[in-house]
Image (spheres, rainbow, N blue to C red):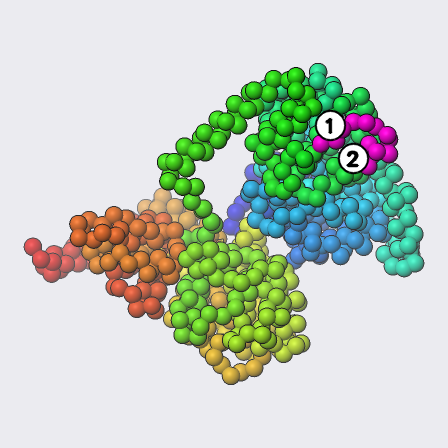
Amino acid sequence: MEISFHDEIKSLQLGAGATFHGEGILAVTKALLQAGVSYVGGYQGAPVSHLLDVMVQAREYLDQLGVHVEACTNEAAAAAMLAASINYPARGAVTWKSIVGTNVASDALSNLASAGVLGGALIVVGEDYGEGASVIQERTHAVALKSSMCLLDPRPSLDNIVRMVERGFELSEASNTPTIIELRVRACHLRGSFLAADNVAPRVSTRRPLEGPPQFAYDRLSHPPATFRQEKMKAEVRLPAARRFIAEHQLNEAFDGDQSSVGIIVQGGLYTNLLRALQFVGLADGLGASRIPILALNVVYPLVPEEIGAFCAGKRAVLVVEEGQPEFIEQDIATILRRADLPTRLAGKDCLQLAGEYTTEVIVRGVGKFLAAQAPYLDLAPGSAWIAGVEAIRDRAQRLLGGPLPARPPNFCVGCPERPVFAALRLVEREVGKAHLSGDIGCHSFATFEPFSMGNSILGYGMSLAAAAGVAPMMASRTISVMGDGGFWHNGFLSGVSSSLLNRGDSILLIMKNGYASATGTQDLISTPPEAARRAAAGGSAVHTDQTIERTLRGAGVRWLRTTYTYRVGAMMQTLREAFTTPAAGLKVIIAEGECQLERQRRLRPRRAEQLARGERVVRERFGVDADLCTGDHSCIRLSGCPSLTVQAADDPLKVDPVAHVNNDCVGCGLCGEVAHAAVLCPSFFRAEIVHNPTRWDRAKQRVRSTIIGWLQPA
Ligand code: SF4
Ligand code: SF4
C-alpha cells in the first residue's frame, strides 16, 4: 500500500490531556488502545478500512505496547481470533464491513457467542447501509439477535463513540458476551475532537504473556453437551447481566423536552439526523436542544425494559426511529410495553418508510406525520415549508435537465488494468458468442456498468466460480467466472477452485491479478509483489514479479493456466479465444496481470514530482485523438469507457457529432491504441511523449521533426 498514515499514527500516541482531532473510525482505533486491547484483527472494507490500515502501519508502536495486530485474509479468520478471549482475560477487537463481512464471519461468531468470553471481545463493524452503501442491504441487528450478542449503535459524537468502545469491553466482560459496535458511514467519517487518555498496556500481551499452562475447560467449548448449557446461560445469566450493566452505567441517553406527552426513541447512530430533522420542523435549536423528549439507544440490543418503560410512562405516544427492516427494535418495544401494561401508543414504521436510509428528509416527513396525529396542537408549518422547498428545488432541477438527474455509476479508474480485459472479452464475444459471466466482488464488478454491461450474477466475495458450478452444466458454451486476486485469497481458491477441481468442472476462471485488494483500499495480499520489485518497476507495471497464485493453482492440479499482460488486448483476446474453444477438459484459468493503476500512480507521481523539482528530464506518455481523422462514431468509447476518453465539439462544420478527445488525465496505459488496433478502428489515435526539462538533444530532435512535418503539410 502506497499511502502513509504517518499523521494518524501520531494521533494514536496522544496521551492524557491532549486533544485528539480526526475521523470517527480513527477515534475508535485510539479508544481501543486506551481500553487496553491485547490483540486486533480484521478484514478491510469501507467504511472501517482505516482502523486496520492504520494499525498495520503502526505495528512498530503497537509492539512497544505489546498489542498484536493481524491483517486477516477474511472475516471468518478475524472472528476466529476472538477465541483468545474465551479462556483468557485478554481484550480483543476485530473489524470488517457489515453485513457481508458478518455473514462470512458468522460461523465463528455463533461459536464464540455460545461459548461466551472472559476477556472483552469487541467486533467493530462498518454498517454499510443506505445511500452510500456498496453491498446488499441487510441489518447486523439480526445477527446480534440470533446469537445473543450485545449490539452498540453509538450516537455520533467522538466523545460518545470513544466512551462506547471503552464501555463495550466492560459490557462484554460483565456479561461474558461478545459485543458488536456498529458504525454507520457517517459515524466513521464524522470529524471532531475529544480529550485523549493515555494508552493502556494490555494485561495480557506479547510483552506480558500468560503464566502457566493453558487450562482445559470443557464448558467453554462450543460442543455438546456444553452447548445446551450455554444456550441457557445466554438467556438466564448473560443477557440479564448485560441489561444490568447497561442500566447501571447509563449507556443509553435520555434527553428531556417540554413536550412530555410524546417522545421519540431513536437508534443512537441516527440521533444527529433526528435532531437536524427536528430543527427543520421547528422543534429543536441549533445546539441540539429538542422540545420532544428523546431516548437515544446507544445499545440497541438487548433493550432494558425498565428504561423503555420509564421513558414511555405518562406519554400518550412514542415514535421509534429505526432504520431498515424488519423493525426489530419496534417489535421489542411493543412487547415491553404490552408486558408492562403501559397504554402508550407506539408508532414507527407506520409513519416512517419501511426500508432505505433515514435521511433528514425522510425523518422530517415521518416525525411530521407522527406529531400531526399525536400532538396536533404543535405548529408543524416550518417542517411542511421545508419539505415544500426541497420538492421545489428537485422539480426545478428536473425541469432544467429535462428529466431526472442522470445516474453516475462508478467506473474503473483512468488506465485501470482491468478495463482492457473486458474490452478483449467484448471483442472475442463477437466470435464465440456471449457467455454466462459469473461476477464477483471487486473493481472488476464495474464491468457490470456501461459500456461493458457484463455479468450475470454476483453471489459474494470470491464466490464467482462456485456460483458458476450450477449454471455451467446447463450452458451450451463455457461459462466464465471473474474474480480478483483479493477474492481469490479471501474465498475463491477454496470455494471455487478446489470445488471445480474436485468435480472436474470445465469452465473458465479469469483472475485479475492487480497485486492488491484494490476495491477495499489497495491492501497487500500474500501475492503482492515485494516492495523492492515495485520500486524497481519504475515506469512500467510490476509484471510477473510474484507467482504465488500460479504456484498455488499448479499445486492444486490446474493444468490449463495462462498468464497474460492485461494491456496487450490482442494477446488477451487470443488467450480468451483459446480458453473458450480448446478441447482440453477441466478448469481453465487465465491470470490477467497488470498492476492496479491507482496504486501505481500513487507511487509514480511523487517520484515524478521530485524529479521535476530537481530539474531532471521526465517523460510522460499519453494518448490523443487526431480530431481531423475522427469521424465521431465513438466505437473506441464503447470498447473502453475510460473517463479520460471523452468527447468534444468538432471544429469541422461538416461534422455533426462531437469527436473523441483524450483529456490530460490520461496516464498513457496504451489501451486506446491497443483497442484501435485489435478492433480495427480508425487510425485517429496517437501516442505522445510529453518531455519535461528537455535536453539539447530533445530540442534538436523536435526542431527537425517540426521542420519535416511543416514540409509535408499543405500550405
Ligand atoms: S483501484 Fe486499481 S484495480 Fe480498481 S479500478 Fe482503480 S486502477 Fe482499477
Ligand atoms: S490510453 Fe486511453 S484508456 Fe489508457 S489512460 Fe489514456 S485515455 Fe485512458
Residue 343 among magenta residues: yes
Residue 596 in the figure: left or right of residue 168: left
Q: Which residue is mark 2?
A: 333
Stretch of the chain drawn in magenta: 333-347
> Where residue 434 sits: x, y (%)?
46, 70
Q: Position of residue 61 (x, y in %)?
A: 66, 43
- Name the quarter where the C terminus is drawn: bottom left
Q: Residue at x 52, y 47 (%)?
A: 3
Residue 636: x and y in percent read 33, 60
Q: Quadrant of residue 192?
A: top right
Residue situated in front as seen by the camera: 634 or 683:
634
Badge 1 or badge 2: first in the primary sequence: 1
Report whether 268 appears left or right of 418. Answer: right
| Camera-nearest residue between 661 and 698 | 661
- Residue 279 visible here: no
Task: Tell me which residue sits at (84%, 33%) in the image.
Answer: 338
Whether residue 235 is visible: yes
Describe residue 624's horizontal placement relative to residue 336 as left or right.
left
- Label 1 residue near ligand 1, CB within 8 Å: no
Q: Amino acid at mark 2?
A: Ile
Q: Position of residue 151 (x, y in %)?
A: 75, 41
